[in-house]
Amino acid sequence: MASHPLLPLPDEDSSGSSATIAAEAIESSAQKGGSMAQRRFQRGTVFLRGKNPVWVGRYLEDVILPGSPNPVRVRKSVVLGTKREYPTKRLAQRRMEVILARINDYSYRPGRVATVEQFAERWMAQVVSKLKSSTAHGYAAHLKNQIVPLLGKLRLDQLGVENQQVFVTQIAGKVSRTTTKNILATLSSMLGTAKNWGYACETVHLNRLVFPERGVRQRRTGFSPSQAAQIIATAQGQYRVMFALAAMTGLRVGEILGLQTSDFDFERRIFHVRRSVWRGKLQTPKSTSSESSLPLPDALAAIVHEYIATIRPGFLFLNNRGSLFIAENVVRQQLVPILRALGIPIIPRQTSFHAFRHLHTSMLLAAGAPASVAQAQLRHADPRVTLGIYGHVIGDEQRQAVEKVAAILVPTCPKQKPVGEWIQ
């Protein structure tokens, strides 16, 4: 893992760094035969710092450092707030009392200390390894590419709001705002585990951090109904069935690749989503709400029934080696050539199975389906996800209302023939 200079620490001052203070504490403890001075009630020290004054609190805390059997006492600092938030020192001291309540409590026990890099290895081995492959892959990528290179040498107890903000500023220019928040979600999950395990650390609070301004959002696009119909008509064999399932049901690609013949009930015209495939590996669906039974339309039932009659019972889709598909390979080897042959634009990072999911949702909403129906079909826990991300169609009611307003303002404007508008 890459080395790097430490980020500016909020508890460094002219008297030395935190590491120096910790070392002095260890030496002091050793001189006393490894025994700690009796813990006493603390009020801490509060003072102003900086050109734009902020109140800083300083206090002592017992921690257990790696390789040390006995706790040592270290001096720590915390930013309490700005002068505007706490106009007087007395108000800042009251805030300090809240922070020290944990340490002054009779049940307080010294916290364990480790660097971010050290704990990340333990977290990956003990926690992340037990998660779904797709989730573990995302966590591992964030740790390898951003968290460990930039924060690895810091101790967990040094990763307060100030260093979290420095981290956000460092990665914000390299990745998108959404990716930045996803990386912080990984860091937050790791720190939450560390706190539960008794390590001295502070969790991530997004409301305390400042993010770059949101840029112009590029809306993801979907195929038009005519394009999807052409794709299904052009595809052959199992790929025709894949694309038909994607367009007619809005399933995620992993859910499609995980379907088995036993999941289809042709008599009741339903099918069941029970599993998913990620990079050729079987796993559970995205969430518990993703596991559901969905209606099987007649046109799709005919396509699937005809195909199942030609294969053995088991998984619907297997590659030439008899293994589960990798979605990216299907897109590259099958979908992209069909799009080129049909003259359908290929948009980098958006030409995927997900375009069928966008199409299906838009067609549901255009057909007048309530948001609750679209939500149930896509199996979202929150209907705002359905409408906010996948609603690409301008409904008839919205268009008619706008047309009435325009007709009042410009009554002589000739009327145009109504057309369905698909935003792409």
Image (spheres, grey):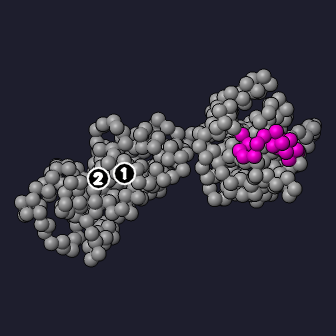
Q: Where does residue 330 sit, x and y in percent of width and height?
A: 68, 33
Q: Residue furthest bottom?
A: 106
Q: Which part of the image, by quadrant, shows the N terminus?
A: top left
Picture quadrant where residue 383 is located: bottom right
Q: Amino acid at mark 2?
A: Ala
- Look at the image and say whether residue 307 sits in the magenta stretch: yes
CA distance for labels 2 and 1? 10 Å
Residue receiving disc 1: 122
Q: Name, please, the residue furthest toward the front.
A: 312
Vertical placement of 275 versus 34: above or below? above
Expressed as whole percent of the image width and height from the top left, the position of residue 38 reads 15, 72
Q: Which residue is mark 2?
A: 114
Q: Amino acid at mark 1?
A: Arg
10 Å crowding of disc 1: few (<14), some (14-19), many (20+)? few
Residue at 33 percent of width and 36 percent of height: 2
Where, quadrant-wise, is the C terminus in this rendering?
Answer: top right
Please identify, in this view, whether the residue under mark 2 or under mark 1 is nearer the observer.
Answer: 1
Residue 140 image point, x, y percent: 45, 43
Q: Nearer the viewer, residue 68 or 368?
A: 68
At numbered mark 1, what does the secondary structure look like: helix, strand or loop? helix
Q: Which residues are magenta?
A: 299-317
Q: Is residue 260 visible?
A: yes
Image-based side of 59 in relation to 374, left or right: left
**Residue 246 visible here:** no
- Please tell me in which quadrant of the rendered image residue 379 appears: bottom right
Q: Are marks 2 and 1 in contact (CB under 8 Å)?
A: yes
- Within the magenta stretch, is there residue 237? no
Instruction: Give residue 290's position: percent from left, percent from top.
Output: 67, 55
User: For the point 10% across and 56% down, which residue is it?
Assistant: 27
